[in-house]
Amino acid sequence: MTVMFADMVGSTALSAKFDPELLGGLIRRYQDAVAGAIGRYGGFVAKFMGNGVLAYFGFPRAFEDAAEHAVHAAIGILSEVGAIEMPDGTRVQVRIGIATGLVVVGEIIGTGSAQERTIVGETPNLAARLQALAGADCILVSESTQKLLGGLFELTHTGEHELKGFARPVPAWRVCGEASVESRFAAIRAGGLPLIGRAHEMGLMRERWHLARQGEGQILTVTGEAGIGKSRVIEALQQELAAEAHARINLQCSPYHSDSALYPVIQYLNRAAGLAPADPPDVRTEKLRALLGARHIADPAALPLLAELLSIPLTEAAPAASPAQRKAATLALIVEIMTRTSDSDPVLIVLEDAHWIDATTLEMMTRLADSITRARLLVVVSARPDFTPSWLSRSHATLITLGRLGRPECMQVVASVAAAHGLAADTIASIIAKTDGVPLFVEELTRSVMESAGEDSVPATLKDSLMARLDRLGGAREGAQIAAVIGRQFAFALLEAVAGKENDELEDMLAKLVAAGIVFPEARGFERSFNFKHALVRDAAYESLLLMRSREWHARVGLALEQRFGDIAAKEPELLAYHFGKAGQLSLACDYRMRAGNQAVSRSTYVEAIAHFTAGLKLAETMPPQDGLRRQLEFWLKLGAASVVTHGLQSVEAETAYTKAGEIGEQLGDGPASFQAKWGLWINANLRRKTALARDRAGELVSLAQRSGDRELLLEAYHCQLSTAYFRGDVGGALEGCQHVIALYDMMQHRHLAHAFGGHDPAVCAHIQCGNSWRLSGDEQQARPHFSQGIALAEMLDHPNSLAHGLHNVGIGYQLGGEREATYAAAHRAAALADKFGLPPWRASSLILVGWATASGAAAADAVRLIDAEIANATAAGPLPQYYLGLAAEVLLAAGRPADALRHLDRAIAGIDEAGIGIYLPEIYRLRGACLLALDRGNKTEARSAFATAAGIAKRQGAVIFERRAEASLSEFAI
């Protein structure tokens, strides 16, 4: 709304200067002149306050160019009031302030002549302050009003002013008069109209379709600002292809589901399989089976994967797999379903509004882009300009950027919309001058002119235009507002459940909305649904709601979804979290955010999980402490675990989450939660190679677990202690910790700990690190049984990560003893598991072991190439970079590259956090001495020092085998 405040200059002095009767007549003439000018320009006189007048433009009926009308009225006031002569012969003068912004207009208060509408908001206060600031016969306007006026008036910036009640200086502009010409208006974005001015883009799309039809798959990305015509271009392609035999797959992203993994895909699969809401599970299962059969997909794992994705219960069990493996298999299956669709006919896949895409759908689309080069398939993606997917660099990818239309094309748009209306030439020119080439803006402004009962006034803003169209709906406006709360797409059944209207009344509302072009029906399988014509139309309807009314409708939507649409509540808890959050029902919103995050974790979609947990945390932080702190603790712990997977165990994100959780856990006196948080801080320090800090944090965990009396926590605390000791090269400490874990562990009671802490089983780790520690201490006979027991336990647990962890560390054990064949067998199997189950940390490090094991004879050159290829990956993260650098150096030294080997060794030594502390450090110094001698026999002094350092560190660590090797090097050196 635009608000005007006008006041007579010097009215107090006039009361002392003139007779009251004369003054009364003067004021009446003044008020009549002001009210007359306001009325002529469509304004509403809200209140007379002595000599002051408060007026609204855009109420009680919204109109598009309210700011322009207000300034015209103000200029008229100056002219008419200036014609009023006072008894002393001088002229009446007036000050006027005008401001534009959102306000809340309340009920009528008062009676008779004292009646007025209450108005709340910053805008009327700003108008009053600008009026007080203005000089005699001066009009001052606010920044928001100035932006709407564009070049219609000559304006002078008067600077920024300190105004009472406003925290920051407020800019103001003085109205000098009307401008001689109109300037361009910065158009608000919009979309969807007859296809004009896109011949070049359509030619490119036809050419790519032709290539795809011949078996050269293509992916087209169409970008442009909102309303530029992306959807219309894609629709035109679809219309052209209607006569050709082809299949079509439509995927629609949603702003409400940008954190919902595979939301567009799930909606497509529901439609493709013909799943109806009322279908029982067995019917849904058979429909899925039919869908897979039609795509000739016979893999027995496909049906369980698809059923899990669509939340359909299955009687047959899915094959055992980790969440990461299931995610990878599901994405591969989706890609296969889409590509197999092209077996008989070419396929057009359309993904709309990719700027709202969730991370997992983006990953799927990237896989799809890499899978279509030999398929009869064209993928078309629409998005706003900031969307930059990785597939743009592919040779079969094309980027189309839609620009704004030129003046001739805009004239064609106006002509096509108003073909039967006959708009005046100056009206058309005004429309074009103000639209700046955005197609839907042209259409909306033209349509608004056509609907204005012959008034050829051009709207000044799209928002005002849309608000005016909503106002013209009468009672149907409420239907648009309720639908806007639900979202851009809305099902009739949900609207009916929320609105509380009789069926006939609701149908009448929808009919009016469809007739007005506000919404349009949409075919969505068995569900009767509607869609707002454009996001901006929906936004205008939503923003017209008062805050309390908006909260009420959101609460009703959330309650309806919870009570009557249980399948949506189960599959899309984030949707309920959104509505309850908007309703201010924070406890329920947090519950559903937690469900959404946990659901994402169960599907290994950790980016989405972090988004849900972060959103829940923000809600919890606004709650009262007695409930909010507990919820914050839960969200921080969840964020810590998800950050470990997404950003890495050593990441700042994980450390921050666990630090916050630890602080809140201590504040609440929650022992288990504090332990979990401190565990996160321990693993973070370990993998950042802060060995002293990791040792101290492991000690804190043992103390905390002992105080709690919790056997599971104590078991895990010793697991941390043994691991830290092993990474530090403390052989005795590692053996002690391993023995504690083995003594406490019971497989049936503790097998779940692999999922709760660290991703691998504590006893598998303890047995194998116990074997490695015995081997380091020189006791071969004690080591081997622990290797066997650890691997056997991992296989019984059927936990891929524990098995990969066990095999890799057994490989390290065999390598420590110099057993190449046994090292190769264990490491090769670990690398294969990593490939199969998507476990990147074990792949690179196991391949380094494979390289070491094969670095002899004819295979030595291949081993060197493997080491060179994988060393960066193996040392990128984790607590053992020095170990892998040492193995790489040994291989390069044997291959005759001592200088390269020495660089690896020096890098390993530079990365040590504490001098003399770290697994394999004695070997690194010993190898360094050997490299120095290989480079130049004159390096004897430095080499002897390296061998002596190796022997000393090994002795302190209790690493007998390393001490023996260092002593042997020293003795050989002496000879």
Image: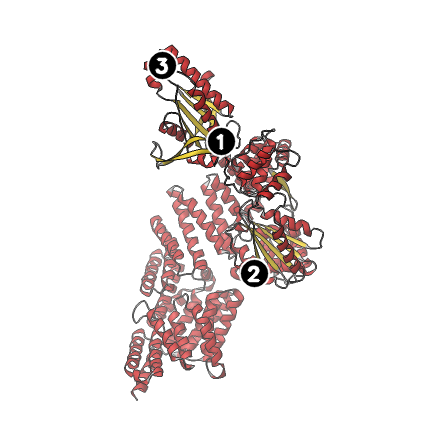
**Dividing the picture into quarters, in which one does residue 136 lie?**
top left
Residue 756 visible in the current orientation: no
Q: What whole-number distance in Å separates the C-alpha atoms at marks 3 and 2?
A: 86 Å
Crowd rating for badge 2 (residues with CA inside 10 Å; few <14, some 14–19, many 20+): some
Q: Which residue is mark 3?
A: 88
Q: Nearer the viewer, mark 3 or mark 1?
A: 3
Q: Nearer the viewer, mark 2 or mark 1?
A: 1
Check whether the beta carbons of the residues at disc 2 and disc 1 lie within 8 A of each other: no
Q: Given the image, on which type of amino acid does mark 1 rest?
A: Glu
SS state under label 2: helix
SS state under label 3: loop
Of marks 2 and 1, which one's residue comes earlier in the chain? 1
Q: Which residue is mark 1?
A: 68
Q: Observer-nearest residue: 32 or 706?
A: 32
Query: Considering only vertical position in the picture, is 359 above or below 851?
Result: above
Q: Observer-nearest residue: 308 or 150?
A: 150
- Image coordinates of residue 395 in percent, x first then y, are 57, 63
Crowd rating for badge 1 (residues with CA inside 10 Å; few <14, some 14–19, many 20+): many
- Image coordinates of residue 358 in percent, x first then y, are 52, 52
- Image coordinates of residue 408 in percent, x first then y, are 60, 43
Q: Is residue 98 left or right of residue 575?
A: left
Of marks 3 and 1, which one's residue comes earlier in the chain? 1
Q: Which residue is mark 2?
A: 367
Query: Considering only vertical position in the picture, is 550 above or below 326?
Result: above
